[in-house]
Amino acid sequence: MNNKILLVFILGIILLGSVSAFEFDNVIRYEKDDMKVNFENAFGLPLIGSHIGSAELKSHPTIDYIKSVRAGDSVVIWYEMDFKEIYEDGLEDVEFTNLETGETIEREWEYVYMGDVEYTEKGKKCEAENSSCVEIKDKVKIKKGWVEYNLRDIPKGKITIGVRTKVISGELTDVVLTIAGEKIKKHAGFSGAGAGTLADPF
């Protein structure tokens, strides 16, 4: 009788674990000095659990590093995600906390992703010797930059997803993401700096 109950329990886990909507059986495992989070379903049990995907912190060198970010609208944290399949509604709300007071901060924010951004290269060209300029056609070029991400799904394959929000100069802030139903408790924070500070290398 006990064996039958165990068999039913295992089959139930297998069936539920194959559907991303059921997140109660998801677990996370940290590696790379807690910089990378691996997501597994079916409680990560041997032979039953399977790897769903991963999210690696790329905006900070360590999880306890306080990143200096330009005041104003800036991207404050980003992860490189790599999921085996599309994970529907895998990106949940972001939480902000004041690191000095411990109080929750209510602030508007949005998800962004690293993608192709068009920009125009002006066509006027000047010769250094005689300072004469020649008009040539403007060129539309492509560079990497942050693009608004209007979905909550995590796509299949690799993608870099970040959080953009309003940064206040001098404020120390902790930011926590919930991915695939799991809150990333080992994460990093940021501090608001002057206008000359770059928020990211892109």
Image: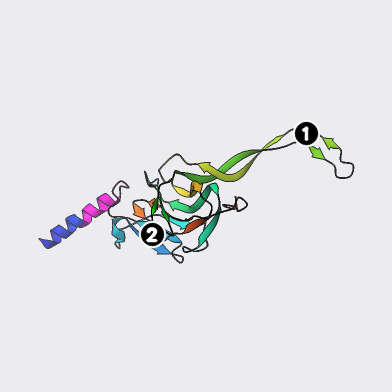
Direction from residue 183 to residue 202 in the image, left or right: right
Q: How far from the left and from the top, in percent, is residue 131?
A: 86, 41
- Which mark identifies residue 200? none
Q: Residue at x 53, y 58 (%)?
A: 67
Q: Observer-nearest residue: 36 or 193?
A: 193
Quarter of the picture containing the N terminus is bottom left
Q: Is residue 48 visible?
A: no
Q: What residue span does the magenta drawing correspond to?
A: 10-26
Marks 1/2: CA–CA distance: 53 Å
- Which mark identifies residue 185? 2
The kind of residue tagged 2 is: Lys
The kind of residue tagged 1 is: Ile
Q: Residue at x 90, y 41 (%)?
A: 130
- Which mark identifies residue 136? 1
Q: Residues within 10 Å of mark 2 (few under 14, many from 20)?
A: few
Q: How far from the left and from the top, in percent, is residue 24?
A: 27, 53
Q: How far from the left and from the top, in percent, is residue 145?
A: 57, 45
Residue 28 falls in image quadrant: bottom left
* Magenta highlight on residue 92: no
SS type, badge 2 = loop
* Magenta highlight on residue 20: yes
Direction from residue 153 to residue 145 in the image, left or right: right
